[in-house]
Amino acid sequence: MYSELIDLFYSNRNQKQAEQMSVYMKNKFSFLGISKPKRAELQKEFIKQQKKQKNIDWNFVFMLWELSEREFQYLALDYLLALKSYLQKSDMEKIKILITNKAWWDSVDILAGNIVGELCNKYPELIVEYILNWYKSKDIWLVRTAILFQLKYKEKTDTELLGRIINNNNDSKEFFVNKAIGWALREYSKTNKTWVKSFLDSNSLSRLSVREASKYL
């Protein structure tokens, strides 16, 4: 069934769209040229059947991650999102591999806010084991993940931890780190404007972070 789906993706390639998609992603990856709606249509039945399995085939995930065209990483992410309730504590190490390989915002942001966030909510001890190391990492994608993993936590957000992670990285020159700081604060401002405003007033952040964080203030 895996090979049939992969063949189906290849048979639906669109060279013109592939070139446009590659340019949009700064030519970081090659593409088949399959739009998101079309991809959803092609994989719909497969995902439906996989949900019935009630377990994650990590060999399949890593096989997709090795394929050249970016749509296969998107398929892997959609597969994980569909089966995220079956994620185990031990899967965090595997997720770290996905974060740090073929890393770019399109894959990392899905993993951070949905997969890592879900796992850390389910197993808080993972915050100590992973997040507290990642936010000090030299790998900007692990840092970005640490900043964004609470993105959907709303009132459950650990503001002390969020503040600590941000302040450890507030002198970063990395666009994707500063953007993530602003995004995390902007999202939390929907829950607690007062805290975010006070944090911005009390800390020195990049102009990009402040601009992003202030959108709803």
Image (cartoon, grey):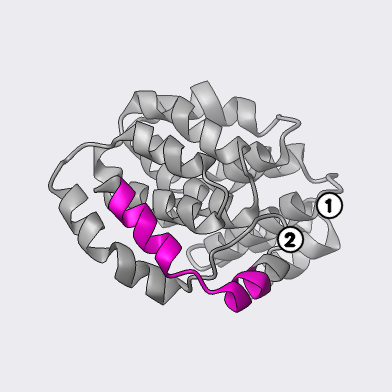
Q: Secondary structure at mark 2?
A: loop
Amino acid beneath label 2: Asn
Tell me if residue 60 comes above or below residue 204 in the rendering: above
Where is mark 1, residue-wise?
Answer: 204
Q: Residue 156: x, y in percent?
A: 41, 48
What residue type is disc 1 on? Ser
Q: Secondary structure at mark 1?
A: loop
Q: Quadrant of the C terminus?
A: bottom right
Q: For residue 150, say whether it is visible.
A: no
Highlighted range, magenta: 3-21
In the figure, 171 relative to 127: above or below? below
Q: Position of residue 17 (x, y in %)?
A: 59, 76
The residue drawn where x is 59% and y is 27% is 132
Q: Residue 21 got which mark?
A: none
Q: Would you call the spot at circle 2 few (<14 residues within 10 Å), some (14-19), or many (20 or more)?
A: few
Question: Mark 2 = which residue?
Answer: 27
Q: Is residue 164 above or below residue 6?
A: above
